[in-house]
């Protein structure tokens, strides 16, 4: 079953509506992050696209390992499991400003939707090589959906 298309206006608007139901004290149903850290964590996916200098690219050997071991879990349709492993770049420590992180994530979602799926079809990802538009969609949508569900949104 195909995942909802995050590149479409109704789906991206729906995700943003879910984000807007959160507040600074929204409790997690599982995991170690607080809601502000979760929003920052979700933005990392977009940082890897739009702020490439912020995160060093993996070397050739590590990229090969990531493609072999993690790519299908990240870009496939199967949902993430609760408490799964987290890549080091996605581990958020310390306090984060809820409103700033919320606005930043929403801005990334809107920018991605406005660019559209054709902009991503055949685009190289930071860690997995060339992805098609469906793989990009799956990665964006299911990561957001997983963490919004984590916080009851």
Image (cartoon, rainbow, N blue to C red):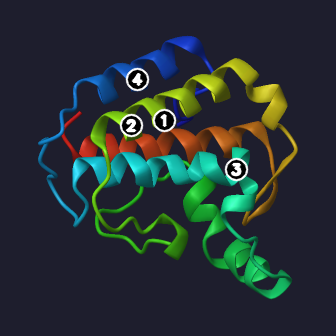
The residue at which mark 1 appears reads as 104
Q: Residue at x 80, y 82 (%)?
A: 59
Q: Is residue 77 left or right of residue 16?
A: right
Q: Which one is earlier in the sequence, the residue at label 2 or at label 3?
A: 3
The residue at which mark 4 appears reads as 16
Q: Which one is earlier in the sequence, the residue at label 4 or at label 2?
A: 4
Q: Nearer the viewer, mark 4 or mark 2?
A: 2
Q: Residues within 10 Å of mark 1 (few under 14, many from 20)?
A: some
Q: Disc 2, disc 3: CB below 8 Å?
A: no
The residue at which mark 3 appears reads as 51
**Which numbered tag is attached to residue 100?**
2
Relative to 136, does residue 107 appear above or below in the rendering? Answer: above
Q: Is residue 119 left or right of residue 16?
A: right
Q: Disc 3, disc 4: CB below 8 Å?
A: no
Callout 2 secondary element: helix
Q: Position of residue 67 (x, y in %)?
A: 73, 72
Callout 3 secondary element: loop
Q: Position of residue 33 (x, y in %)?
A: 25, 61
Can I make out residue 76 in this image?
A: no
- Which one is in front, 139 or 76? 139
Callout 4 secondary element: helix
Relative to 19, does residue 139 appear above or below in the rendering? Answer: below
Disc 2 to disc 3, C-alpha distance: 17 Å
Q: Residue at x 29, y 48 (%)?
A: 36
Image quarter of the C terminus: top left
Q: Which one is earlier in the sequence, the residue at label 1 or at label 3?
A: 3
Q: Position of residue 64 (x, y in %)?
A: 78, 80
Disc 1 to disc 2, C-alpha distance: 6 Å
Can I make out residue 46 in this image?
A: yes
């Amino acid at each position: 079953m195909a995942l909802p298309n995050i590149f479409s206006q109704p789906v991206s608007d729906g995700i943003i509506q879910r984000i807007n139901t959160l507040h600074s004290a929204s409790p997690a149903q599982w995991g170690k992050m607080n809601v502000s850290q979760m929003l920052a964590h979700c933005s990392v996916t977009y940082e890897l696209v739009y702020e490439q200098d912020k995160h060093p690219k993996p070397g050739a050997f590590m990229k090969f390992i990531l493609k072999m071991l993690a790519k299908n879990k990240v870009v496939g349709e199967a949902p993430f499991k609760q408490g799964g492993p987290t890549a080091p770049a996605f581990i958020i420590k310390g306090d984060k400003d809820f409103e700033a992180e919320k606005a930043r994530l929403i801005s990334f979602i809107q920018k991605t939707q406005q660019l559209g799926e054709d902009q991503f079809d055949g685009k190289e990802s930071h860690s997995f090589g060339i992805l098609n538009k469906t793989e990009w969609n799956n990665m964006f949508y299911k990561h957001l959906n997983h963490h919004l569900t984590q916080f009851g949104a």
